[in-house]
Amino acid sequence: MKLAIFPGTFDPFTNGHLQIVKKGLKLFDHLIIAVGENPNKEQMFSLVQRRNWIEDIFKNNNNVSVDNYQGLTIQFCKDVGAQFILRGLRSSDDFNFEKQIALVNEKLESDIQSVFVMSEESHSQISSTLVRELIRYQGDFRQFVPKEVRF
């Protein structure tokens, strides 16, 4: 079984994230959406809220599960037996950043491979940071997130 994790803080989960998961499900038998707890990032939404949204989005998909973790992503992969890390790329900046992380991860654990998929152009400018700004300043963010995340 090809098991991958899709790590992120998902603060909040966006349509861009949803699209990457859908692409990942074409490549892997099972995908764990791994909600990272990053003490260096100030989250707008609690870990419980973020997990609940994602679990609700994928409640009818047995090939997706949701978990959370602290620490190194590569260690979480080892802990759950994942062979792949799924990452979405919106731009060349994303690629340069993700490439550095992937190369370090490969040195730490050569049996775990990073797999990059491109976001569609319609989602290439969507980020959780942008959505948080829209929420913070009462902008209409709903078009950028799945219906389960709208409030």
Image (cartoon, helix red, strand yellow):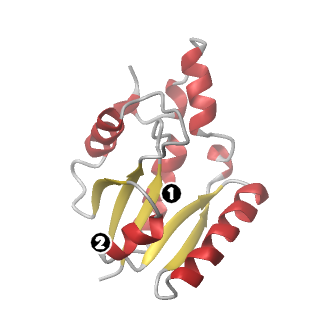
Which quadrant: the N terminus? bottom left
Q: Going by the picture, which residue comes out furthest to the top?
A: 138
Q: CA distance from mark 1 to mark 2?
A: 21 Å
The picture places residue 22, in percent across and down from the top left corner, at 43, 58
The picture places residue 151, in percent across and down from the top left corner, at 38, 19
What residue would you read off at disc 1?
20
Count the labels in the image. Answer: 2
The picture places residue 99, in percent across and down from the top left corner, at 69, 70
Residue 103: quarter of image: bottom right
Front residue of 144/52: it is 52
Task: Check disc 2 and report its element: helix, strand or loop.
Answer: helix
Q: Going by the picture, which residue comes out furthest to the bottom?
A: 111
Instruction: Decide: is 111 above or below 95.
Output: below
Q: Which amino acid is tagged 2?
A: Val
Q: Is residue 139 left or right of residue 111?
A: right
Q: Is residue 43 left or right of residue 54?
A: right
Q: Is residue 76 left or right of residue 106?
A: left
Instruction: Decide: is 77 above or below 134.
Output: below
Front residue of 124/40: it is 40
Q: Residue at x 54, y 19 (%)?
A: 135
Badge 1: residue crowd in 10 Å (few <14, some 14–19, many ≥20): many
Disc 1 or 2, which lies upstream in sequence?
1
Q: Which amino acid is tagged 1?
A: Ile
Q: Residue at x 46, y 43 (%)?
A: 10
The disc label shown at residue 80, or none: 2
The disc label shown at residue 104, or none: none
Q: Are marks 1 and 2 in contact (CB under 8 Å)?
A: no
Badge 2: residue crowd in 10 Å (few <14, some 14–19, many ≥20): few
Residue 78: quarter of image: bottom left
